[in-house]
């Protein structure tokens, strides 16, 4: 009937879920906010406790989905349990444990800009594991982006590169980005299950792998229980970067593939840099601008070059 109110699910699909640009842009905005949280959480909660409580919260959010969906899709879940476990541990726990630890050693701006290197790691992974063809422009894009990463890690001082005096937080972020790129590549091969069901399965494996890390942190006497602000930050990362952003990212991968979805991470450093200056009052240095230009320029060239290559998605 024409006089009925539009169906909410139809509006959701029309406005967001069936629009890859919107899905992936919103994902990058929420992940940019996650970079701010990694820095803001330093005096409020320890990194492994933050990681564990984040996934406890997400598992509670998805508990109704798990209760209804896991029994129904159990044969498929059991058949693909190792792939699901790998994606949950690598893409969720591993990335976030490194991500939040990095926040203790480097600025939120650095974290956001270095996160922009994920698309290049995706391209390299596609070349190595998917045998994708790479054009000259793509290689130039890779080189520019790696130079941008080096500019951040060295704080714009080439002498730091010669002396290998990298910031530990920057190195942890580079390792986290490489791992998330591998997650992005493997994500396309996940079981053909409803997105909320597969996400709930990822979240539970993320929780199972996060708890031992929190236990090690506790045994080492490094645990910091959340303050009131810490709980607010946990709530934010549970609902937005963890739940909504991951659902939208999986949808983006379904719509346009892992390589093109990975390229949208170039928006993360833009959002993170703006949010870090506005919300945390961090200084924006010339080397930040240079690194940002190099990372975004390299990704733009890689995307432009991919459009000219044969056999690329």
Image: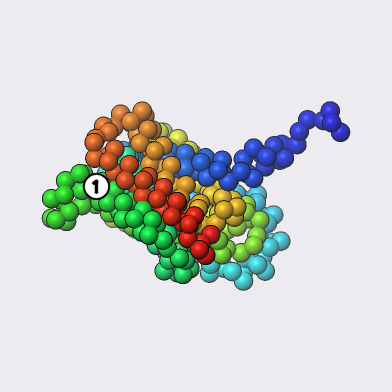
Tell which of 190 and 58 is nearer to you: 190
Tell which of 4 and 106 is nearer to you: 4
Q: Single out the residue that lies furthest toward the front.
A: 308
**What's the coloring here?**
rainbow
Tell which of 211 and 193 is nearer to you: 193
Q: Residue at x 78, y 30 (%)?
A: 5
Q: Which residue is mark 1?
A: 151
Label 1 sits on a secondary structure element that is helix
Q: Residue at x 33, y 51 (%)?
A: 145
In the image, 145: left or right of 238?
Answer: left
Image spot of residue 38 (x, y percent): 36, 42
Q: Is residue 58 visible?
A: no
Q: Residue at x 24, y 40 (%)?
A: 287
Q: Is residue 123 visible?
A: yes
Quarter of the image for residue 107 reads top left
Image spot of residue 182 (x, y percent): 44, 61
**Mark 1 crowd level (few <14, some 14–19, many ≥20, 10 Å Cα):** many
Q: How many marks?
A: 1
Tell which of 197 and 183 is nearer to you: 183
């Amino acid at each position: 009937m024409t006089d009925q109110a539009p169906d909410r699910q139809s509006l959701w699909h029309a406005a967001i879920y069936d629009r890859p640009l919107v899905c992936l842009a919103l994902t990058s905005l929420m992940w940019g906010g996650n970079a701010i949280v990694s820095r803001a959480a330093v005096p409020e909660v320890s990194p492994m406790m933050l990681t564990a409580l984040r996934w406890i919260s997400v598992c509670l959010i998805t508990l109704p989905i798990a209760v209804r969906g896991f029994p129904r899709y159990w044969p498929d879940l059991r058949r693909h349990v190792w792939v699901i476990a790998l994606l949950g541990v690598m893409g969720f726990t591993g990335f976030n444990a490194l991500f939040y630890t990095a926040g203790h050693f480097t600025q939120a701006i650095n974290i956001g800009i270095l996160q922009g290197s994920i698309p290049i790691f995706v391209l390299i992974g596609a070349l190595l594991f998917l045998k994708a063809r790479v054009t000259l422009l793509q290689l130039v894009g890779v080189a520019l982006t790696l130079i941008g990463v080096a500019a951040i890690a060295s704080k714009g001082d080439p002498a730091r590169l010669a002396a290998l005096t990298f910031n530990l937080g920057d190195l942890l972020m580079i390792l986290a980005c490489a791992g998330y790129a591998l997650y992005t590549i493997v994500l396309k091969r996940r079981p053909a299950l409803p997105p909320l069901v597969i996400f709930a399965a990822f979240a539970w494996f993320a929780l199972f792998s996060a708890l031992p890390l929190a236990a090690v942190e506790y045994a080492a006497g490094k645990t910091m229980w959340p303050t009131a602000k810490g709980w607010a930050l946990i709530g934010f990362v549970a609902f937005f970067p963890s739940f909504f952003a991951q659902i939208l990212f999986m949808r983006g991968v379904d719509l346009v593939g892992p390589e093109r979805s990975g390229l949208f991470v170039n928006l993360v450093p833009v959002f993170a840099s703006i949010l870090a200056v506005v919300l945390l009052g961090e200084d924006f240095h010339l080397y930040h601008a240079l690194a940002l230009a190099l990372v975004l320029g390299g990704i733009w060239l890689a995307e432009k070059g991919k459009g000219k290559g044969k056999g690329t998605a």
